[in-house]
């Protein structure tokens, strides 16, 4: 559980800096974690090596198959940044006191994630999920989405048989008919649809202020001590967005290669996101800036997600001030 490895404690700022910046190295060593969320501009930044080019550091990339899995690494301070993360695992972490902040909201899921059901499972609506087996990455964005959809349909959260598994495991379980449904994101969401699964709901059905986002987060102590590297990190992300807009065909090719997809699938997945640039971050529809950060779509989503996770027992402590976990300052500097 998240609480167990958070109880191990946090390194001090000085110890963290020592970990990230070896005394004998010419440049600091930085580890950036990421998930494979299918075709998005982050994959362009990674594929073109822009983190390595734009950051004055020795950059290492580390893959995680889900957000909860990354939380352990963040708790142990072995990561300086994490991208492709869903909101619920982030909320769970900050509710336990981990000093983290969203410094870049990559994108909002629209049609690139949701609930798919196996034909013949007898599921034609959300109400039909009662008593059925649904695959889910428990503690991820999927927990919030499922709880939201079930509440709208008047179905008790505990009445659905939730089977915790990683997205790759869901593909196998779907093939062997050991699950009736899955709530997941691209590329597995798209792969299950290609295998004949029926889409019951997508994240486009969620409101903007209680939505599904992929975000990049950082340790607040670390970025406060190294603001220039945080700005460089955001600059590299923004460069991937700009490249995608200016060179859509080349960008799709890079995304497909990085995500392990064909270009047709990559194009379909990209359409399932609302992409945000560095300049977008300071707007109310994304992170906000200054006083409007408290009422931005991202901050409200943190609050709404926390309320749902608290109700279903995924977190034990409500968020005191969600706006403290949203920081658009580095994006504002990068966008100048």
Image (tube, helix red, strand yellow):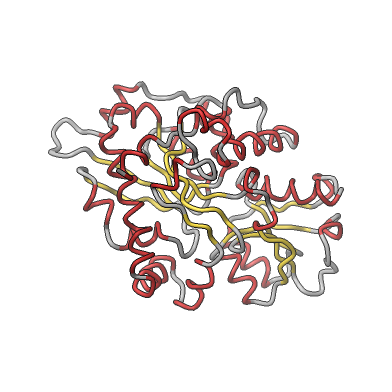
- Total residue callouts: 0
Whole-percent x and y of residue 237? 35, 51
Asked if residue 321 lies left or right of residue 53, the reply is right
Asked if residue 124 lies left or right of residue 258, the reply is right
Asked if residue 197 lies left or right of residue 284, the reply is right
Please say if 241 is above or below 328. below
Whole-percent x and y of residue 314? 68, 36
Quadrant the N terminus occupies: top right
Q: Nearer the viewer, residue 172 or 291?
A: 291
Q: Residue at x 70, y 65 (%)?
A: 116
Please say if 183 is above or below 99. below
Q: Which residue is drawn at 37% across and 37% down?
A: 78
Whole-percent x and y of residue 159? 84, 48
State which quadrant residue 94 falls in: top right
State which quadrant residue 46 falls in: bottom left
Quadrant the C terminus occupies: top left
Q: Which residue is drawn at 87% across and 48% down?
A: 154
Q: Residue at x 74, y 47 (%)?
A: 148
Whole-percent x and y of residue 40? 45, 61
């Amino acid at each position: 559980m998240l609480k167990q490895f958070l109880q191990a404690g946090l390194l001090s700022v000085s110890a963290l800096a020592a970990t990230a910046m070896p005394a004998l190295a010419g440049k600091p060593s930085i580890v950036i974690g990421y998930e494979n969320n299918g075709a998005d501009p982050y994959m362009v930044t990674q594929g073109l090596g822009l983190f390595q080019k734009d950051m004055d550091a020795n950059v290492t990339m580390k893959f995680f198959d889900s957000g909860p899995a990354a939380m352990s690494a963040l708790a142990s301070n072995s990561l300086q940044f994490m991208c492709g993360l869903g909101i619920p695992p982030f909320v769970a972490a900050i509710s336990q006191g981990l000093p983290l902040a969203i410094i870049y909201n990559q994108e909002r899921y629209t049609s690139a994630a949701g609930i798919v059901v196996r034909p013949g499972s007898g599921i034609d609506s959300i109400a039909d999920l009662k008593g059925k087996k649904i695959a889910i990455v428990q503690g991820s964005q999927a927990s919030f989405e499922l709880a939201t959809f079930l509440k709208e349909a008047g179905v008790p959260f505990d009445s659905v048989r939730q089977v915790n598994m990683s997205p790759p495991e869901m593909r196998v379980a779907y093939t062997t008919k050991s699950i009736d449904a899955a709530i997941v994101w691209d590329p597995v969401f798209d792969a299950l649809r290609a295998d004949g699964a029926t889409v019951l709901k997508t994240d486009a059905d969620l409101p903007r202020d209680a939505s599904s986002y992929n975000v990049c987060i950082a340790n607040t102590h670390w970025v406060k001590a190294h603001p220039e590297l945080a700005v460089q990190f955001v600059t590299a992300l923004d460069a991937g967005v700009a490249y995608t807009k200016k060179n859509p065909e080349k960008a799709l090719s890079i995304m497909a290669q990085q995500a392990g997809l064909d270009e047709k699938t990559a194009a379909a997945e990209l359409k399932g996101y609302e992409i945000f640039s560095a300049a977008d971050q300071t707007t109310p529809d994304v992170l906000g800036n200054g006083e409007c950060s408290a009422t931005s779509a991202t901050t409200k989503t943190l609050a709404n997600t926390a309320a749902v996770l608290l109700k279903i027992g995924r977190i034990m402590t409500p968020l005191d001030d969600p706006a403290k976990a949203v920081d658009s300052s580095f994006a504002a500097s990068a966008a100048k």
